[in-house]
Amino acid sequence: MRFYLLFSFLILTINCTFGQDNSYLRRVLDSIKTEQNTGQKARLLYVAAKSYLEKPGELKEDLDSALWLNSRSQKLHLAENLKTDAALNMLLDARIQEEMGKPSMAKSQKEASLHFANKNQLSKASAVIYLSMANDIKDVEFKQKTAFFEQAIQQAKKAGDKLLEAKILMEQASSLSNYGSYPEAIQKAYNAALLKKQNRELNISQELVMIAGNLRMQLRLKEALKYALQGKAIVENERIKTSKDDMAAVYNIVGLIYYDLKSNKEALENYQKAFEIAKDKGDRYAVHTVTLNLATILSRLNRTADALNLLNNVTKDYATDVYAIRYAYLYTMLYTREKNTKKAFPYYQELLKYYKTGNITGQERHIMMVGISSYLFADGQIKQMYPYLEEIERSLNKESSLLRLSELRKLYYLADSARGDFKSAFKNFTAFKTINDSINSVDRAKELTALQLDYDTEKKDHDILLLKQKGQLQKSLLEREAIIRYVFIGSLIILIIFAGFLYVQNSIKKRSNAKLTLKQEEINAQNEKLKQLIAEKEWLLKEIHHRVKNNMQIIISLLNTQSAYLDNADAISAIQNSQNRMHAMSLIHQKLYQTDNLSRIDMKWYIQELTDYLKDSFQSEKSIQFKIQVDEITLDVGQAVPVGLILNEAINNAIKHAFSHREGTVFISFKRTKASPYDLILSIADNGVGLQKNIDDGESDSFGMNLMQGLTSQLEGEFRLVSDQGVFITIQFSQKEGEI
């Protein structure tokens, strides 16, 4: 009797000290006072203890309450021989000791709980304890962490608890993701989703978020958005039970993927939804995560002041070192962007502090090194950047994130430029542009837009279906009595009408089929005629191109014969130049009749063929190398011929005049570019002796130079020539509209 009086007094005391925002815990404590079943009372005590432990703030009185309630729960569980629950009480006690700042006591209590569970063959309890021990291990101790996860999974399988096994797989997936093992993390999350489906659990949004997040890190953005939008459909489906945690996580990952796709509007909308949900729930982990992402998108939109204001207004009650690192990184990047190294310095120092501990791995270590490198660049400490850049490069060997590789190449380019190593800077800038072009692929953007459209359509169809169902339900309630009265008469009338309808429909169908058969035969005959006409047209076009090519070859042969009778070197050179120009045009017609495409020229093939021909035709003793970089570009004949003639003139000049009996290299590049107003850029450069005098655009009397300028005008483009330790020729023009 004294125990129950004391127990009631302590519960009442706990209730009185509890705040207004803890209504759930108050209800649990009220239920404990009235519960008669000992086993159920023990479980309620466990729930109350856990709730006190998880309250924000880690107040001593809360932890004392948690310890007392858990102790009472354990005694009752043991009294009822509920050994699994008693083992979980021991684990909860270890967690409370941890929060009280007693790590050695917490460790021994956790080991005692595992010994108790294994001794009594409590598979479910063992699985939960192994999972807790795995989460205690730091990410850097990867093998030991993995071993605990595998033991937890084995015990969950032994217990036959698929939902617990799915939870463990998700925890392991999170660890693998932090370590950079993205494919393995995806597989674990996928297996977790399968287990939940087998258990008829419809809410797999967490698993979809994990899969999407790891696909995003591999830059498989099409697949990532597909899984993220599936998760979004789940949390927005009224028939599936989800939590605010699920919704915040889904909107956050959708925002991240749109951020990577540079769809800033969609990214901002989803981040704002995630932020409002996390703030409303009071989840500080989610608030920190989404705040950082929201500040990042504001920075991209050049709203640096808004981003800093957002960061400054969030309470910095960091849950883990991860958030401390990410806040320090973001402050560093924002202030260095404003060239305010003085304000960035404390955050740079904080990043250095975490970097020197050496126990931070994965994404956090990467952003630490990027933040440190960015500050050093802004502060002019260029030489000090390289050790961090080299470490980033080494770490990327374990990962396949193009986003991080692009970021690294940009930092290398900035550092090389600042210290005057322009050759290395050009190399890194080219790599950066190539990766960015891959990331911003037009085809990928179209596919992702299609995915978003599918999602929107599916959502609208779902909403329409719900409205129809509601309407039908209301209508059926109003008309139920009338339908019951006339059901027999109505059924008979419907049967007669249906029989007549079938008869009429069958007659109409027979007549329609006969008409359709005749029309189909006519269409087939017409199609055969059209196929024959197309085949004849293609044959004629190929024959024309073949003959044009043969005629040009005859002209080249005639010029070659004529040159044999000439002694004048200038005349022979002029004839040879004419031969080369004819060959440049001949190659185009050759390609057109050799392929199925009668209107387009593959410029990668054409430039390589033309270069090989010119190199062989001169048979120079000079050791000249050709370096060619050409995007996948096709041009019609009207643009391919001027481009070929320009290349012919530029390469001829380089071979003849650039190197003066010494080694050298000719660089040829043909790239797409987003620079306005042109979208194609052709560059021919050499590292030879350069021109003998300064030549500005439009001031040369050379026939070849005038020809190149005239051909550029024909392309409606822009011609530039620079002579500085070699010759650099650039022609910018636009592909004809509708022919890209």
Image (spheres, helix red, strand yellow):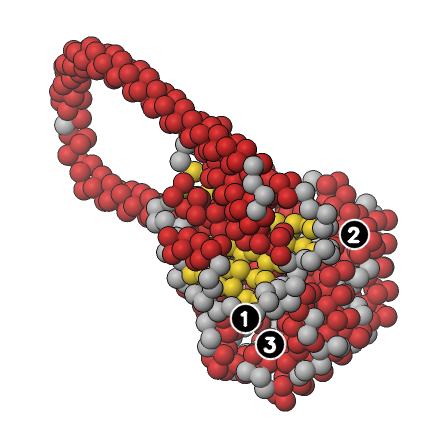
> N-terminal of the two: label 2 or label 3?
2
Quarter occupied by the N terminus: bottom right
In the rendered view, does 660 fall on the left or right side of 287? right
The mark lying in front, picked from 3 and 1, is 1
Rendered image quadrant of residue 665: bottom right
Q: Are marks 2 and 3 in contact (CB under 8 Å)?
A: no
Disc 2 packing (10 Å; few <14; some 14–19; many ≥20): some
Return the residue at label 1: 694
Spot occupied by residue 716 in the image (x, y as percentages of width and height):
37, 56
Return the residue at label 3: 333
> How far separated are the C-alphas under marks 2 and 3?
34 Å
Spot occupied by residue 267 in the image (x, y as percentages of width and height):
46, 62
What's the amino acid at mark 2?
Answer: Thr
> N-terminal of the two: label 2 or label 1?
2
| x 49%, y 51%: residue | 646
> N-terminal of the two: label 3 or label 1?
3
Q: Residue 146: which numbered mark, if any?
A: 2
Tag 3's secondary structure? helix
Q: Is residue 524 above or below residue 187?
A: above
| x 33%, y 44%: residue | 461
